[in-house]
Amino acid sequence: MKRLETPSPAALAGALALSERRLTAEEARAALAVPMGEAEENESRSLIRWFRRRYPTPAARLAYARRAYRRWASARPVAPPGTTG
Amino acid sequence: MGAMEGSLFEEANFFRAIADSGARALLIGRRALIALGIPVLTVDYDFWLHIDDIASFNAAIEPSGLYPTHTPEEARTRGRYVAENDERVDVLVARSVPTVDGIHVAFDDLWPRRRGLEVAAGVVLAVPALPDLILTKRLGGRPKDFEDIRLLEALRREDGP
């Protein structure tokens, strides 16, 4: 079995550029026009309910997020794409 | 300028100092989504700050080891700045910003509709009302901002009218 290799700096940079690019007005309008399907809504609401049940206060949620990010960052050489803002 | 003083940062103290400063600051971005109940990953803090409150905001966060990249005068001209150390705080100070699809969003419209969230024990920070937070996500215009909008719409349906 081939061992999974770490992406090259160029590949990481490419992924970052894709995640940070600014959509055009047309692309934005198209994205906003996509209706939320029942499955997507149910999945998202289920995730929100779990998170709120597990961490019932904003303070607890924020503390969890800091812990989760620290765990993520400690396992990776660079910040994952799409984690700003 | 204390480049390696990250150990000074403690989130509750950081939030408390902002709340106590009286600066009109709205927590936006993914940190606001998390506080509201959406589990997403983020590395930084995003605030939309009233343009007249830059100095008081900066004074409040300096004890957390966060130093602005620009003077208040420069920030007013640029419309945004960063305060950083080993934490990063993106601060928007423009009075009004257009969304990627051309809607102008003004701080003075959002501020009266804000809601308070207890982000640490006894510390209440302001976040935009949910429809306004969705609008602020359209300022960034990145693919992930539109993914976040879908999650915020799901949250809006979850919470009801």
Image: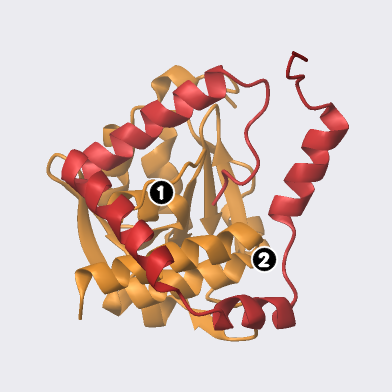
Residue at point 87%, 34% (across, down): A10
Which residue lies under the disc numbered 2? B77
Image hue for chain B: orange
Residue type at mark 1: give it: Arg
Q: Nearer the viewer, mark 2 or mark 1?
A: 1
Across the whole image, how many numbered discs are drawn on residues? 2
State whether residue B89 is above or below residue A29: above
Image x and y of residue A8, in percent: 84, 26
Query: Where is residue B7 shown, x and y percent of the image?
Result: 43, 18
**Residue at image point 39% right, 32% down:** A66
- Helix, strand or loop at label 2? It is helix
Tell me if residue B9 can be seen. Answer: yes
Answer yes or no: are tags 2 and 1 on the same subunit: yes
A34 left or right, relative to A24: left
Crowd class of label 2 (few under 14; some 14 to 19; many from 20; radius 10 Å): few
- The red-tinted chain is A
Q: Residue at x 61, y 65 (%)?
A: B140
Most extreme residue toward the bottom is B103
The type of residue carrying mark 2 is Thr
Give the crowd class for mark 1: few <14, some 14-19, many >=20 residues within 10 Å.
many
Q: Pick the residue in front: B156 or A58.
A: B156
Q: Where is residue B156, by image quadrant?
A: bottom left
Quadrant of the snapshot with the N terminus of chain B: top right
Location of residue B114 (image quadrant)? bottom left
In the displayed structure image, the side of residue B18 where residue B81 appears, left or right? right
In the rendered image, the quadrant that contains the C terminus of chain B is: bottom left
Q: Earlier in the sequence, mark 2 or mark 1?
A: 1
> Which residue lies at the image location 72% right of the left edge and 65% below the top edge?
A22
Q: Which mark is residue B31?
A: 1
